[in-house]
Image (spheres, rainbow, N blue to C red):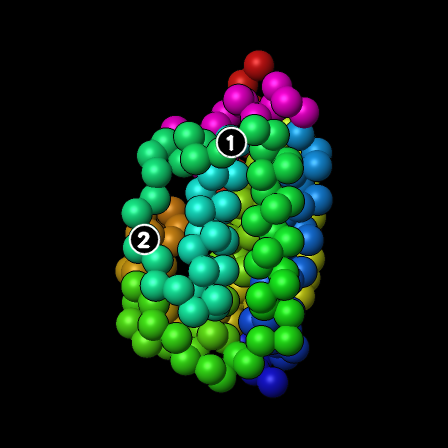
Amino acid sequence: MVCVRHCGRLTQVTLQPDVAFLRGLDFFSSAVRQLSAEDWQRASPCQGWRALDVLGHVGQATRFGTLLLQGAQPAWSPIEPPGAVIEGSPQAWWDDLAGQAHSVVEGVDLSQEVDSPMGRRSIGQGLSFPALDLYIHGWDIAKSAGCDLAIPPEAIEFAHAVIAPIPAEQVRSSRIFAAEKPAPVDATESEVFVAWTGRDPAWHAPE
């Protein structure tokens, strides 16, 4: 069990990376189901990306990770804009990828090492950032449809544990998070976390 300092207090982090990832798949899938066919073309909180592009980004990363866990050595060459990778129904496309990912992650040995673009690392390490992406980008696409999905407290604790060892100048960069936004005085724990990731909790898609 890991302890991480969060908002001035020490918090026990009980989620393992595989559990965080599998629950993240479910969270992201719940967001996908919120969108109509028209909503996929709406703007997202990710500057320059439509909801469809956020889905394409997450889907490409999920497919890549699934192939790694299956023993393949895929090249990481994401398509731009990310939404161009999606064929047919966005929900059906995602459901297929999520199902495959769930099958390979469930029961995986977290200590097993695999080759990745970041070098050789354990599966537990490799699942951590993708798990965060599922929650944060799930919030993003739900916002495109005008929906507010609360990120669960255990996912927030997990995120802080993953980010804590990384130097601040690396966290606040184009690779991870933008500068922290101010959160409303009466913000929920989820809204405080969203602001910490550099997003405006009150963001809404232009009409």
**What main secondary structure does the magenta stretch of the protein show?**
loop
Could you tell me the amino acid type at mark 1? Glu
Q: Quick one: label 1, few (<14), some, or many (20+) residues within 10 Å?
A: few
Q: Are marks 2 and 1 in contact (CB under 8 Å)?
A: no
Q: Which of 88/170 is in front?
A: 88
In the shown orientation, is residue 48 left or right of residue 196? left
Image location (x, y in percent) of residue 143 = 61, 34
User: In the shown orientation, is residue 86 left or right of residue 23?
Assistant: left
Q: Residues within 10 Å of mark 2 (few under 14, many from 20)?
A: few
Q: Position of residue 97 (x, y in %)?
A: 57, 49
Residue 44 lies in the magenta stretch: yes
Inspect the image, locate mark 2, and give the three-letter code of the amino acid beneath it: Trp
Residue occupying image coordinates x 58% and y 39%: 93
The quarter of the picture where the C terminus appears is top right
User: Residue at coordinates 41% horizontally, 80% vertically from top-left?
Assistant: 113
Marks 2 and 1, how far apart in space?
19 Å
Quarter of the image where one finds residue 83: top left
From this viewpoint, is residue 142 visible?
no
| The label number, if any, that marks residue 31 in the structure image | none
Identify the residue under disc 1: 87
Q: In the image, is residue 175 part of the stretch drawn in magenta?
A: no
Local secondary structure at mark 2: loop
Identify the element where label 1 is drawn: loop
Q: Which residues are magenta?
A: 36-50
Tell me if I can see residue 117 in this picture. Answer: yes
Query: Position of 4 compared to 169: left or right?
Result: right
Residue at the image point whose x is 50% and y is 45% from the top: 59
Q: Position of residue 89 (x, y in %)?
A: 61, 30
Vertical side of 13 occupied by 38: above or below: above
Per the image, the residue denoted by label 2 is 76
